[in-house]
Amino acid sequence: MKVVSLFDGISCLRVALGDREVEYHASEIDKYAIKVSHKNYPDIKRLGDVRTVEFIPDLDLLCGGSPCTDLSVAKKDRKGLEGEHSSLFWEWVRVWKLCKPKYFILENVNSMPKKDRDIITKELGVEPIMIDASLVSAQSRKRLFWTNIPVQGLPLDRNILLKDILEPEGSVDERMTIKGKAYCLTATYCHANTTEAGIKNSVEKKQRTLVKIGHIGETNGQANRVYDPDGKSVTLSANGGGSGAKTGLYKTETRIRKLTPIECERLQSLPDDYTAGISNTQRYKCLGNAFNVEVIKFILSFMV
């Protein structure tokens, strides 16, 4: 099976392909992502910058998540597909038209403007499928997938909560702890509701989504919000700032802390220490840019 992965990152597509016999070509320029990918799959054939990728014959699958930087709702004054980074989508289209693969998958954020979503849909000729990784992991991560693979339905909900993937508190580095700030906790669902319907609603809400319980410091920005491990995690971010901007903050029994790199690997359905060998800062960045492996596995399961 001949595969090309554009914007390959840490090769989560290769993980999702599992034991299939694959000739895997990858286009990536981030040296830290390449280091992680090479450590796990040294046989990958490197294509370099997406703008230099040429014709590859007999291609079975073209996959990639073009940059979402200018499409995400987190970006102020976003310029969409005309932006410096997200305009690389057109390089994905160029390679797609050049190589004419049997199957293709394009991934991007669900929060993009409707105008850009419609442009991509018209260009590729298929409607996107929205899949939330919370169905197969403990992470709330809504993504759009444009594909000609005949996907049916959505993955079954595995009911995985953040607390299910946390490392034992005793093994978590103290540097993960948020210190030196007072915090105020205000419930976002009703603990006091003792009716049968109220209890059922609270439990179901916790299983489906984030459960915010307060914030640290004086501001309620994303980097300062604190969540309950009995719910899902926030969407991992590659470009977030300090405090909990990349992983979210969570109140355990003993402290408020951010997630460890291993916990973030688990949120992306990767093996523990898959990204080991680079700094934690770069591990968080690589994981924030990655596919959720189980979501991609689900899509690939419909490929003939």
Image (cartoon, rainbow, N blue to C red):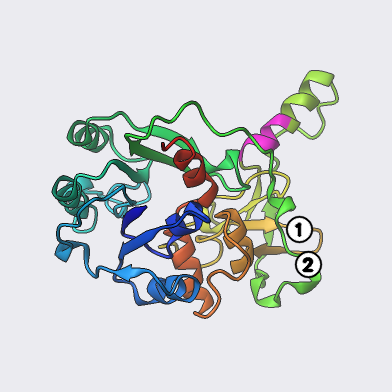
Residue positioned 47% across, 46% down in the render: 296
Q: Which residue corresponds to mark 2?
A: 169
| One can see residue 217 in this view | no
Residue 252 disc label: 1
Q: Quadrant of residue 103?
A: top left
- Which image quadrant for residue 217? bottom right
Quarter occupied by residue 205: top right
Residue 298's tag is: none
Which amino acid type is shown beneath numbered disc 2? Answer: Glu
Q: Is residue 257 above or below residue 154?
A: below
From the viewer's perspective, is 253 left or right of 248?
A: right
Q: Main secondary structure of the magenta part?
A: helix
Which x, y percent locates residue 4?
A: 30, 56
**262 vs 233, nearest the viewer:** 262
The x, y position of residue 55, in whole percent, is 15, 57
Q: Is residue 207 magenta?
A: yes
Q: Is residue 151 left or right of residue 146?
A: right
Q: Are marks 2 and 1 in contact (CB under 8 Å)?
A: yes
**In the rendering, at what x and y percent does residue 259 appear?**
63, 63
Q: Is residue 30 above or below residue 229?
A: below
Residue range highlighted in magenta: 204-209
For marks 2 and 1, give the CA distance: 8 Å
* Helix, strand or loop status at disc 1: loop
